[in-house]
Amino acid sequence: MQLAQRFRDFAHREARGNSPLYHQRALDIAEDPAVLALITELPTDKQQPNLVLAAARVHGEVSLSYPEFRDHLIEHWAAIAATALARRTQTNEAGRAATLLPVLARLPGPLSLIEVGASAGLCLYPDRYSYRYDGSALDPSDGRSPVVLPCATTGPVPIPTRLPRVVHRAGIDLNPLDPSDADDREWLAALVWPGQDERAARLRAACAIAAAEPPHLVPGDLNERVAELVHAAPPDSTVVVFHSAVLNYLPAQARAEFRTTVRDLPCHWVSQEGPGVLPGLVDRLPARGPDTARLVLAIDEVPLAFAGPHGQSLDWFGQA
């Protein structure tokens, strides 16, 4: 059954090693015809394991045993399904700034950052976070940030020695989230997997930074709105359009359209997407393990590194 395999893949490729509870829960669901039947009532794009599990958490499920979880899911399915239909997997992982920073810090400043698939815009603040690359520490000029991002590295990573100056922050999302809104923060918290307490604390601290100086977030389709945001950026800045784990949610034709659009704009293009999401990069990647959930970091379609999905690692294979 296709849906059962989807949950097995989530367990082995994403949850394993990151959330023991979600790893086992996804495997249990994959073997449970009754629960799978409920989930198939949702549209295909709403059957994502992370979305279903997060919706269940919003309605009270956290670390129950599987039999308790199963009973809870069945009893509250109408509310859980409604949340899954209303929400999206808008994981806003500020940790991804740690893998973006080595690219951003090499560009001439000041920078105008434009994120597509921005969620609440937490990755638009790379200059406000602290970083720990192996034994190297980097903090904002006014001291250590409440958001500290550790990142283990391999290869000739160009570890930044300074943070970029960001003068403009903007983003696009089908449903932008407000970091100052309690319901939106609750949803973002539900998308953090059980057992990842450090990520949950980081999310709260990053939301506080973004709420104090909100970015300019616009609703809409990235292909329809990215050009206007690029042209609205300060003319004396280096404009960077970037995204992390976003294009995989688009059909192939929309991805191709985005590539054409962004390459014709006066900006740099920084992407962090799964291998294969941008076909033009595939033949230029080194070999990797088949079950490794990593993103490919690239600038202007030049692949540079494999990045951990939460910014926890950076394996550089490009030029230093």
Image (cartoon, rainbow, N blue to C red):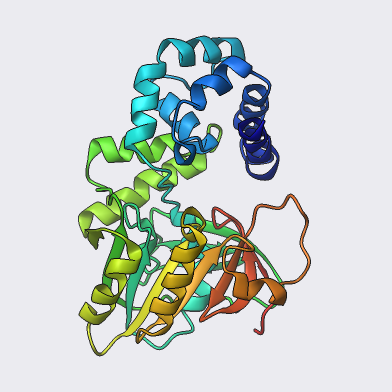
Quadrant assignment, res 191: top left
Q: Residue furthest front?
A: 253
Q: With respect to residue 85, does 70 lie above or below? A: above
Quarter of the picture holding the N terminus: top right
Count of picture labels: 0
In front of the other: 133 or 307: 307
Residue at (31, 49) in percent of width and height:
207
Q: Position of residue 276 (x, y in %)?
A: 63, 63
Residue 142 appears anywhere in the view: no
Residue at (36, 56) in percent of width and height:
122
Q: With respect to residue 318, does 215 lie above or below? A: above
Q: With respect to residue 217, does 58 lie above or below? A: above
Residue at (27, 58) in percent of width and height:
220
Residue 115 vs residue 4: left or right?
Answer: left
Residue at (43, 43) in percent of width and height:
89
In front of the other: 45 or 11: 45
In front of the other: 152 or 283: 283
Residue 308 vs residue 47: left or right?
Answer: right
Quarter of the picture holding the C terminus: bottom right
Q: Position of residue 108 (x, y in %)?
A: 40, 88
Q: Position of residue 260 (x, y in %)?
A: 44, 78
Residue 79 appears anywhere in the view: yes
Q: Position of residue 111 (x, y in %)?
A: 34, 80
